Amino acid sequence: MLRQPAFGHRLKKLRLAQGLSQTALAGEGMSTGYLSRLESGARQPTDRAVGYLADRLGLQSSDFEEPATGSLAHALTLASSTGSPDAVVALRRALAAEAHESPVLRWQALWLLARAARVQGDHTTERDCLTHLVALGDEVGVSELRVRGLTRLARCLRSIGEITPAVDAAVQAHRIALHEDLGVEDRAAALLALVSVQAEAGRTGEARVHADELTALVRGRSDALFAEAMWTAAAVRMRQGDYPGAQACLDDALERFTSQEDLILWIRLRLAAGRLHLQKMPADPARAQHRAEEAEAALALVGTPALRQDLTALKADLAFATGRHDDARALLDELAADRPRMTYRGQVRLEILRHQLLILAGDPAGVPGLRALAQQAQQDANIDLAAEIWRVLADALTPPTPTPTPTAPTAPTSEHTARIAAPAGVVYGLLADAVRWPLLLPAPVHVERIDFDGVRERLRLWDVDGERVRSFHLNRILHPHARTVAFEQEDTARPGAPTTGTWTIESDGDTHCRVTLRQDRTPERLPATTTARSHREQDGESADRIAELRAVAERWERLDQLLLSFEDSVHLQGPAELVYDFLHRIQDWPERLPHIDAVDVREDAPGVQIAAVDTGAAPDGLTRTTRGVRLCFPAAARIVFKELLTPAPIAAHTGEWSLTPDGDGVRVVCAQQVLLHDPHTPHNPRDPRDPQDRHDRRDPGAAGGLAETRRQVRTRLGHASTRTLHLAGWRARTAVRRLR
């Protein structure tokens, strides 16, 4: 039987949850005065009144009864303060019973339930909670809640191997965080999710740029956000083969993050460090064992099934690395007997180890098993994991692929070797990550990956050769353990094509390495004088490529501070074709953009623009000249650009305009990446004829420090891009009005 005052409190809460006034709820069948007395507890409800109100609210009469577990607010308080399993169960029951509670309160309940499921390794339940939570965040309309829900959902989807929706959620969270200019915690959390899913999807170049932005954002902190950021940055570096860089990031987190902050995260960091020591070259099982022992001691205090399985998996890998194959099999059998609570990647790694043991034992099922795992990972868009499996299979079956040999016995050959003051893993990572070349190396303008199976990849590359832009395909074979990259360059316009060769990186102590570039060019019925000239050009080109690589690699410890990436996006009314036309016709910008004084553009090939732009209205009153290359892809609604002549303190600047039709308009995104001048290296004038160069020899670390320089550059470039976008939208709208 419903009794007062509990009925009145419950009635009022259900009415307010639906946004109804007393007048709206009372309708024609009940006076507002009677309803008011019911809510205050002054009148006892009759069965007829209860039935009428239930019908008006679209509920059952039983919904007016207070849940046996107590109110949702009460259950939420207990769960957040104690976190005990009983409190979590009570919260789940209260949420089910209080489906009409306020969206914000239900959001908080789902957040706690998702966190509890994650700690237990129950990622399916976590995903279900987060899916409902994201919908509630959209309903509430609070940007912070939307970003937090999408961020956690992206990381959860990554954990269970659903990479494509994980990328979508992470990109959406990142865009909202930037567009709404949210606080550091929310922006960093969105970047954490974005970096992790990009790396999993094989987009390591983008992941590295965003990881560098993330580490800069949390610099100076020592909390859980800092620890997760450094862990994520380490994971990206590991996947690029930069093991010293990965270890430096993890060591920083291990040293500064204390167990008092979050003991579970403290344990996970040690498990990650242990795995790093097994994966790096050469492996260090002793240090891996030490980290495993640290984690095991702490597990006695807060051990969860998921963490215990992670530790057992690390022990199995350690046993395999030290030749104790029987111990590894026993540990795998122990894990197989329990309900799996590890992430998708962790479970696949166990299967990789299981098949490695089969291959060692001569079992024919080992090779097809690994192949099936790799194909499944590729099908799931888990490109990085697929690449790891293909590498394991290649290492298990074949020696490193020999250098491709020229097809003609008289092929001209060049070989150059240099000692570089950077760890071998860093240098290999720079060579392997071709997508980042346009920002780090002078010649490349843009690189697109066409195909990649984890070992072999096919790229299309545009670069600057003197005053012209050339395009060619590059086929490569990557061997991270041997640290070699074999390549074949196709469709080049210069004499002596195609070119084949190999990069080889050999460790020379912990801080140095020796890099060798060997190139072979096949002459195709060329005159002897042309072949000789081609050989001299090739010889000089090899020396230049190594010098450019050295210039970047020897700054590897400072690159995190010098790199920044950001996006600006706007939604414009008008046809996408007109907006694209505005961005494409750069020669018309002086008449259309107030901050552009002059443009000199030439288009030697369709869609390839070389433009010099004079920009006025600079803070110091100077007119700045930039010169760059723009690659226009109208079918894909993209324009990729690289600045070849940049104003200080910018050393390199790349980016992309992309357009996506959106409802009655178009969303335009300008993504930009910047490399700042290094204050620790001598200034290298970009062009002795450039008058602004005499005024811009500023140390980016001087006035206000590097952080202030980063802020100024981001603000200046962001304002320029958004101003261009808004004017593009205005031109598109006015053009449509004229047509009407």
Image (cartoon, grey):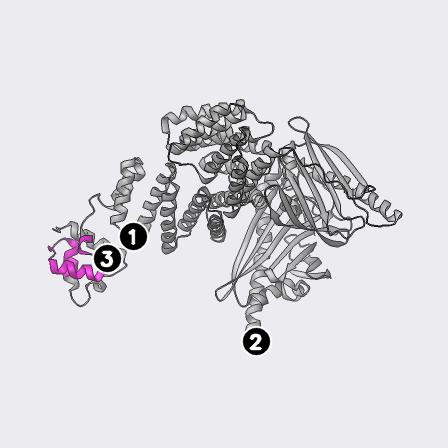
Q: Position of residue 520 (x, y in %)?
A: 77, 42
For marks 3 and 2, the one nearer the N-term is 3
| Magenta residue check for 211 | no
Q: Residue at x 41, y 29 (%)?
A: 334
| Magenta residue check for 59 | yes
For marks 1 and 3, the one nearer the N-term is 3
Q: In which quadrant of the rendered view does residue 719 lie?
A: bottom right
Q: In which quadrant of the rendered view does residue 613 lie?
A: bottom right
Q: Mark 1 to mark 3: distance in Å?
A: 10 Å
Front-most of residues 398 and 46: 398
**Camera sees residue 38:** yes
Front-most of residues 713 and 307: 307
Q: Mark 3 to mark 2: distance in Å?
A: 51 Å
Give the left or right position of residue 541, taking residue 166 as reference.
right
Give the left or right position of residue 211, taking residue 522 as reference.
left
User: Marks 1 and 2: CB-CB under 8 Å?
Assistant: no
In the picture, the disc for residue 15 is 3
In the picture, the disc for residue 160 is none
Q: Position of residue 137 (x, y in %)?
A: 38, 52
Q: Which class describes the residues within 10 Å of circle 2: few (<14), some (14-19), or many (20+)?
A: few
In the picture, the disc for residue 102 is 1
Q: Mark 1 to mark 2: distance in Å?
A: 49 Å
Position of residue 513 relative to residue 15, above or below, is above
What residue is disc 2 on?
738
Q: In which quadrant of the rendered view does residue 628 lie?
A: bottom right
Q: Residue furthest bottom?
A: 740
Q: Residue at x 67, y 57 (%)?
A: 630
